[in-house]
Image (tube, rainbow, N blue to C red):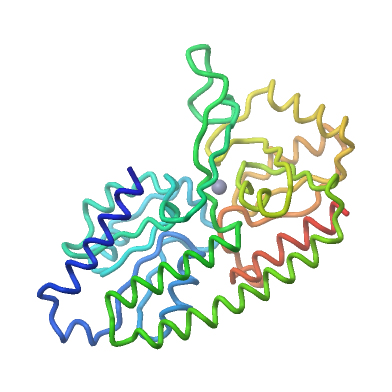
Amino acid sequence: MKRTLHCLTIAAVLGLSSGTGSARAAELPLRVVTLSTVLTEIAHEVGGDQVVVTGLLQPGVDPHSFEPSPADMRAVVAAEVVFASGLNLESYLDRLVANSRAGGIVVSVGDALPRPFAMTAPSDLVAGTSGADHAPFRRELDPHWWHSIENVRVAAGLVRDHYKLLRPAGADIFERKARAYLDRLSALQAWVADEMSQLPPARRQLVTSHDAFGYFARDYGFTIHAISGPSTDGEPNARHLAALIDLIRREHIPAVFAESSTNPQLMANLVAETGVRLGGTLYADGLGLGAASTYEGMYRHNVTVVVEALR
Ligand SMILES: [Zn+2]
């Protein structure tokens, strides 16, 4: 369904660019709204001063529970293009599309990525699915696509292509700025590969608060053991928690990780119960403050914390 949405938005762009859009409007900076901190960075980096970006999500805000305010909706109505994380991360997305500007477009970035990751989560990890009338496992797409640098490369290309369609006169600028950003991502990928080489495969077990690192795990060969499911709003049940405690002891897992925008109490309880070391705090749901306020900074932080705690 969301993939259909993406196709529709592309059609809308084509219709817009060949339609009656005034020449005057095309000279103004492109008005962009983003629904994630990572997309805010990409939108800025690729667009430069040709775009005005309004990011609705501030660093540290939990995207699973975010709800747009009336002011946010006004920004959406004024935008020519909205970049959403997609993959069902924004529960309000259909409402937002219904309210978006006539002729404006909503691009569901995650749904346009080539390899969405379907996780099979025990249903007792997924909010609202516990109980005998449900299957023991439930498959759902992992919306945390930015934990694969390769996905961020695709997202940057998608943003560039939409900018070029909406502002053909700036095509060379968008192309050049996207290339510079992709070069930085290449450098980041090389750095991560070097760091990961310090970590033997058997040590690549990641115990986190919620199941947000599936793409990271896929790229670097980790196994994820999360207290909660792919959203932060689920309460883990006692049986799952007991199994996790058992696993930490049996596998001699040296460290576990808290998350910057997730309730720290669950992980604190696990640490108290097992005596396992708290390896540090990871950025699971977007960019943070200070050194983690850029994508590169956020990613370097996560990799450094994981490698130092587990090697
Ligand atoms: Zn999350």
Q: Residue at x 55, y 58 (%)?
A: 146
State the residue lying farthest toward the top: 132
**In the displayed structure, does residue 69 sit left or right of residue 112?**
left
Marks counted in the figure total 0
Towards the viewer: 263 or 80: 80
Q: Is residue 137 above or below residue 175?
A: above
**In the displayed structure, does residue 41 sit left or right of residue 34?**
right
State the residue lying farthest toward the front: 114
Q: Position of residue 159 (x, y in %)?
A: 40, 70
Q: Residue at x 22, y 54 (%)?
A: 99
Towards the viewer: 52 or 105: 105
**In the displayed structure, does residue 140 sit left or right of residue 70?**
right
Q: Position of residue 228 (x, y in %)?
A: 62, 36
Quarter holding residue 247: top right
State the residue lying farthest toward the left: 20
Quarter holding residue 263: top right
Q: Position of residue 202 (x, y in %)?
A: 85, 44
Q: Quadrant of the C terminus?
A: bottom right
Towards the viewer: 207 or 1: 1
Q: Residue at x 48, y 51 (%)?
A: 63
Q: Is residue 162 above or below residue 207?
A: below
Q: Position of residue 245 (x, y in %)?
A: 79, 30
Q: Quadrant of the N terminus?
A: top left
Q: Residue at x 45, y 47 (%)?
A: 89
